[in-house]
């Protein structure tokens, strides 16, 4: 994603929803940047959630208001403000170092 974007958490995604389907649902907003469905690294199966990012906070607010509960694929989507920006970067770096030590990255 992008460092200075406005990001929405998209929950309750069906198994058929991929990055393209999620992107199509939000691409009508002019500052739409990217859609990403989170997948299990080992199996490749969707985890049932993803993220959508916008450059303009106005599009972010409109999308939250207009798209929450709309069908994307076979299920109504549940939207929430993503908390990614609120995370402590030092905590993230420590976790990455721990994973590296364990050979997970």
Image: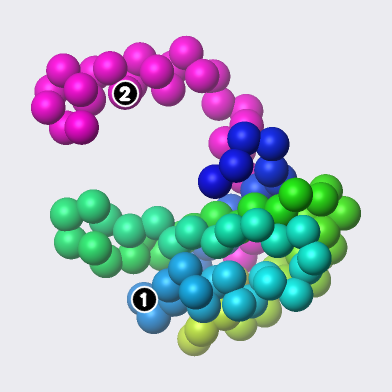
Residue 2 in sight here: yes
Point 65% across, 48% down: residue: 7
Circle nearer the N terminus (2, 1): 1
Q: In this view of the protein, which residue sits in the foreground, 34 or 6?
A: 34
Magenta range: 78-105
Q: Is residue 101 above or below residue 83?
A: above
Q: Residue furthest left?
A: 103
The residue identified by callout 2 is 96
The residue identified by callout 1 is 15
Point 35% across, 15% down: residue: 94
Residue 80 in sight here: no
Q: CA distance from mark 2 to mark 1?
A: 28 Å
Point 69% across, 43% down: residue: 5
- Where residue 71 sits: x, y (%)? 61, 82
- Secondary structure at badge 1 equals loop
Q: Quarter of the image containing the C terminus?
A: top left
Colour approach in the figure: rainbow
Q: Residue furthest bottom?
A: 74
The magenta stretch spans residue 25: no
- Where residue 43 sits: x, y (%)? 18, 61
Dot 2 alpha-carbon crowd within 10 angstroms: few under 14, some 14 to 19, many 20 or more: some
Q: In this view of the protein, which residue sits in the foreground, 105 or 39?
A: 105
- Where residue 27 sits: x, y (%)? 68, 72
- Secondary structure at badge 2 equals helix
Residue 23 in the figure: left or right of residue 31: left
Q: Is residue 75 above or below residue 35?
A: below
Point 51% across, 19% down: residue: 89
Dot 1 alpha-carbon crowd within 10 angstroms: few under 14, some 14 to 19, many 20 or more: some
The magenta stretch spans residue 82: yes
Residue 88, by quadrant, is top right
- Where residue 84 sits: x, y (%)? 57, 36
């Amino acid at each position: 994603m992008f460092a200075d974007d406005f990001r929405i958490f998209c929950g309750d995604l069906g198994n058929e929803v991929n990055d393209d389907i999620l992107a199509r649902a939000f691409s009508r907003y002019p500052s739409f940047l990217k859609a990403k469905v989170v997948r299990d690294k080992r199996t490749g199966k969707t985890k049932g959630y993803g993220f959508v990012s916008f450059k303009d906070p106005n599009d972010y607010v409109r999308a939250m208001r207009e798209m929450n509960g709309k069908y994307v694929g076979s299920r109504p989507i549940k939207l929430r403000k993503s908390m990614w920006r609120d995370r402590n970067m030092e905590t993230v770096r420590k976790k990455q170092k721990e994973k590296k030590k364990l050979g997970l990255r």
